[in-house]
Image (cartoon, grey):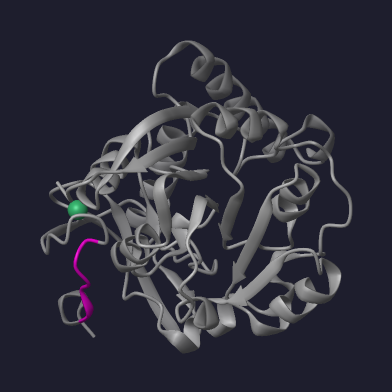
Amino acid sequence: MSIKEKLPKCLFCENTSYKKTAYEDTLFNHKVFEYIQCSNCKLVYVSPLPNYDDLDKMYPVNYQGELVKKTTGCYDKLFTLINQHGNYTTILDYGCGGGKFIIEALSNQFEITGVEFNPQLVGNLKKHLPQATFYTTEEFFKTESQYDVIFLSNVLEHLTSPLETMLFLKGKIKENGIFVIEGPIENNFNLTKIFRKTIFCIRKSILNSKASHVPTHVLYANRENQEMFFRKIGISTLYYKVDEINWPFPMTYKECDTLKKKFLYFIASISVKFGKIVPNWGNVFLFIGKVHNSSN
Ligand SMILES: [Zn+2]
């Protein structure tokens, strides 16, 4: 099957021309998924896009790990930032996982609603945190509620139709409400990315190897194409911060039990240090945006 037959439009700018990338093809659910790059906005995205059957296998109930039982204060700085933008009471956590953000929002006195893909996980969350409201993605699309804040953490890179999903979510924001979005920007500039791409390029072009990871991240963005995408759907930037973490390399030296891991940890640590001084250098982002009155 040729790539052209299955080629989806660019998930951000809807352009249809593309080029191949250094990212290895991956085999999942008896299919080969390729990572291609939009010739216009440089977004890297997977082709073909995962269908319902692929998604069902990608996100089993244990995908999100254990339900979160205790608050840690890990979002305290974020709540301070949110409160600086307005007097908000209701938050939607779209893609709430095991409830990490939900439990923190509850302890900060917010009215919180969580949405998840897997119905069994949603059932478990309802029992675990009865003070919050939960919906499956399917149920949520039929609701009419609106929220002051819509929060997406590590979600955007999983969306197979980010344009439709974000436009729908835009309609769920109350007047003067905000989007708070965080996650990876895997194709943004940093040393780790250059190192990984070089290795991928060698493996793909010389060794002709294939990867076998689950293509849960359907898109690899950078700051530029991501902000273009937000503007295109009518969300303007109030705050944007790029940061860098060791991921996908080892996060701590303790977990480096092989020489290879120690080397990767070393590369990531140098990259993180550069990230502290070079603007827009990094692999994760935090965005706060508000809805435009008109859509351009
Ligand atoms: Zn594009």
Q: Is residue 75 above or below residue 120?
A: above
Residue 269 % position (x, y): 63, 23
Query: Residue lying furthest right in this view?
Result: 70
Q: Position of residue 87 (x, y in %)?
A: 56, 36
Residue 189 in view of the camera: no
Q: Where does the magenta region start and end?
A: 6-10
- Would you say residue 8 sits in the magenta stretch? yes
Q: Which image quarter is the N terminus in?
A: bottom left
Is 186 in the magenta?
no
User: Which image quarter: residue 264?
Assistant: top right
Tell me the chief SS of the magenta region. Answer: loop
Left or right, 159 with reference to 62: left
Relative depth, front residue between 291 and 1: 291
User: Is 17 situated left or right of 46 in this image?
Assistant: left
Residue at image position (57%, 63%) is 95
Name the residue at 76% across, 51% down: 106
Of the pair 154 and 19, the residue shown nearer to us: 154
- On screen, residue 239 above or below 125: above
- Left/right placement of residue 8 relative to residue 45 reads left
**Residue 277: x, y in percent?**
48, 10
Q: Quadrant of residue 46?
A: bottom left
Tally of numbered discs: 0
Q: x%, y% of residue 14?
A: 16, 61
The reply to whether residue 140 is visible in this rendering is yes
Q: Judge from the rendering whether residue 235 lies leftward or rightward of residue 196; answer left or right.
A: left
- Residue 9: name its quadrant: bottom left
Front-lying residue, 136 or 203: 136
Q: Residue at x 52, y 43 (%)?
A: 182
* Residue name at image x 26 percent, y 42 percent: 225
